[in-house]
């Protein structure tokens, strides 16, 4: 395709997209609704984590979606979430501030955060004007040279030239875990620039497609763009699990702590497969946290912290008792059998010996004196009996 024809094709595609944009926004607004949040002044870089009663998360990884400033209502922020969400957590400062989890009855909702431990929830409008229109966004992550003190992203639609942000250098990218900076861009952009130190230096124009991206910027400003996190490119590991007999239909929930990247989109995860001895599953090698659950998530272990990149064997006795190891366990219980509780041998009761009875005294012939003195023998017997009784008492005293 020659250059002129290619430019014409791009222009025609852009025209069609712009014509369909109102329809897309309308359809999205049917599924998404707005949460308004009023925050303390020192809550920087706020985020919302939301999920429904079935455990479906609104966002793929903690801390969730970035909360934006409402330009039409001073002091208020907003974020769009699916209208089915019923539970929320608000955090800021890369997790330095975090509320408890709260239930919400419906959306839209207005939430005033007084502190981490006190919020007010209202379903009566606290802002003025129309709700912000939902625009689907995709996160862009950037790893940049260490001498960049700030990182920004500029995004636009080419060749039309429609900018996603009001002024250069664009949106500030928030510093996150692993040295990555992140910002969201509207779904319709197809060109971006990553810049540092308020706009200089900067990369060249980067052509992109809609979707989450990781961009590595080298010191010479060359870039590597990928659709997966380069830090998480590791071999899969195998998780092997044994569970109690009453734990039916076991599942595995797996994620990366503390960034909260989940392997599976919804709780309780994915079913474990039985190989005749163990329930098994392969998960990415970056996983460092597991929960084994069964009976549709009603029975579950706590968080099991594991070492990344190593195969794991997990023995579950019950929801409170479980262990794991990184080498194959040879002495295992039968499939799905609960680990037997250790049998503590009872200390045998000490049966005291019968008190010896003195031998009957010999019958002395009448009018004949015994050759053995009777009185000394009786005294000796009494002394012996007293000694035996004392020994028995000393032996039994610890059992009292």
Image (cartoon, rainbow, N blue to C red):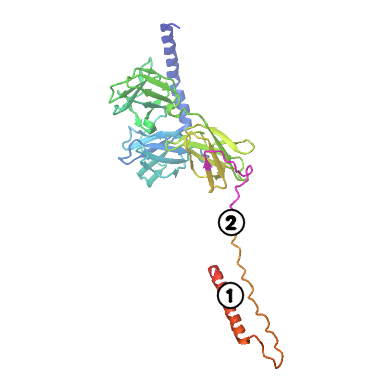
Q: Residue furthest front?
A: 371
- What mark, if any, has residue 89 been given in the picture? none
Instruction: From the viewer's side, name the closer residue of 24 and 371.
Output: 371
Q: Main secondary structure of the magenta part?
A: loop
Q: Helix, strand, or loop for circle 2?
A: loop
Q: Residue furthest right?
A: 365
Quadrant containing the N terminus in the rendered view = top left
**Residue 21 in view here:** yes
In this rendering, the answer to whether 96 lies above or below 358 is: above
Quadrant containing the C terminus in the rendered view = bottom right
Q: Which residues are magenta?
A: 324-342
Residue 344, position in %: x, y? 58, 56
Q: Is residue 77 magenta?
A: no
Residue 56, position in %: x, y? 50, 36
Please tell me how crowded label 1 is: few (under 14), some (14-19), or many (20+) other residues with Cα within 10 Å: few
Report the residue at 32% width, 22% height from top.
Answer: 219
Residue 390, position in %: x, y? 55, 75
Occupied quadrant, residue 49: top left
Asked whether the beta carbons under mark 2 and mark 1 sit within 8 Å of each other, the answer is: no
In this rendering, the answer to whether 363 lies above or below 228 is: below
Please tell me how crowded label 2 is: few (under 14), some (14-19), or many (20+) other residues with Cα within 10 Å: few
- What mark, if any, has residue 388 been given in the picture? 1
**Residue 83 in view here:** no
Count of numbered circles on the image: 2
Instruction: From the viewer's side, name the closer residue of 124 and 303.
Output: 303
Q: Is residue 332 magenta?
A: yes
| Mark 2 to mark 1 CA distance (whole Å) | 33 Å
Q: Which residue in the protein does label 2 denote?
A: 344
In this rendering, the answer to whether 231 lies above or below 278 is: above
Residue 35, position in %: x, y? 41, 37
């Amino acid at each position: 395709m020659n250059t002129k024809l290619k430019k014409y094709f791009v222009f025609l595609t852009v025209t069609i997209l712009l014509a369909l944009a109102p329809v897309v926004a309308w359809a999205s607004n049917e599924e998404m609704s707005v949460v308004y949040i009023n925050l303390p002044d020192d809550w920087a870089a706020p985020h919302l984590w939301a999920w429904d009663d079935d455990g479906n998360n609104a966002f793929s990884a903690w801390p969730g979606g970035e909360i934006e400033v409402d330009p039409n209502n001073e002091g208020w922020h907003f974020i769009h979430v699916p209208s089915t969400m019923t539970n929320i957590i608000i955090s800021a400062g890369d997790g330095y501030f975090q509320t408890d989890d709260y239930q919400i009855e419906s959306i839209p909702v207005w939430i005033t955060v007084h502190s981490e431990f006190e919020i007010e929830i209202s379903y009566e409008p606290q802002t003025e004007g129309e709700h912000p229109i939902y625009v689907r966004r995709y996160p862009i992550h950037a790893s940049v040279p260490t001498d960049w003190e700030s990182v920004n992203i500029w995004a636009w639609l080419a060749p039309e030239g429609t900018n996603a942000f009001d002024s250069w250098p664009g949106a500030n990218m928030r510093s996150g875990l692993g040295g990555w900076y992140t910002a969201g861009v509207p779904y319709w952009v197809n060109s971006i620039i990553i810049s540092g130190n308020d706009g200089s230096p900067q990369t060249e124009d980067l052509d992109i497609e809609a979707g989450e991206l990781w961009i590595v910027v080298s010191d010479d400003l060359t870039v590597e763009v990928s659709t997966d996190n380069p830090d998480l490119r590791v071999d899969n590991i195998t998780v092997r699990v044994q569970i109690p007999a009453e734990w039916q239909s076991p599942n595995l929930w797996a994620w990366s702590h503390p960034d909260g990247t989940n392997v599976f989109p919804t709780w309780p995860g994915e079913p474990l497969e039985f190989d005749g001895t163990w329930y098994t599953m392969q998960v990415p090698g970056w996983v460092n946290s597991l929960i084994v659950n069964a009976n549709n998530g009603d029975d579950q272990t706590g968080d099991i912290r594991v070492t990344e990149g190593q195969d794991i064997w997990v023995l579950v006795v019950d929801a409170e008792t479980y262990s794991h190891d990184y080498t194959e366990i040879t002495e295992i219980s039968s499939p799905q059998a609960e680990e037997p509780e250790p049998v503590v041998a009872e200390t045998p009761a000490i049966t005291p010996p019968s008190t010896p009875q003195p031998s009957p005294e010999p019958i002395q012939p009448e009018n004949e004196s015994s050759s053995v003195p009777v009185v000394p023998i009786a005294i000796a017997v009494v002394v012996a009996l007293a000694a035996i009784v004392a020994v028995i008492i000393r032996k039994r005293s610890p059992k009292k």
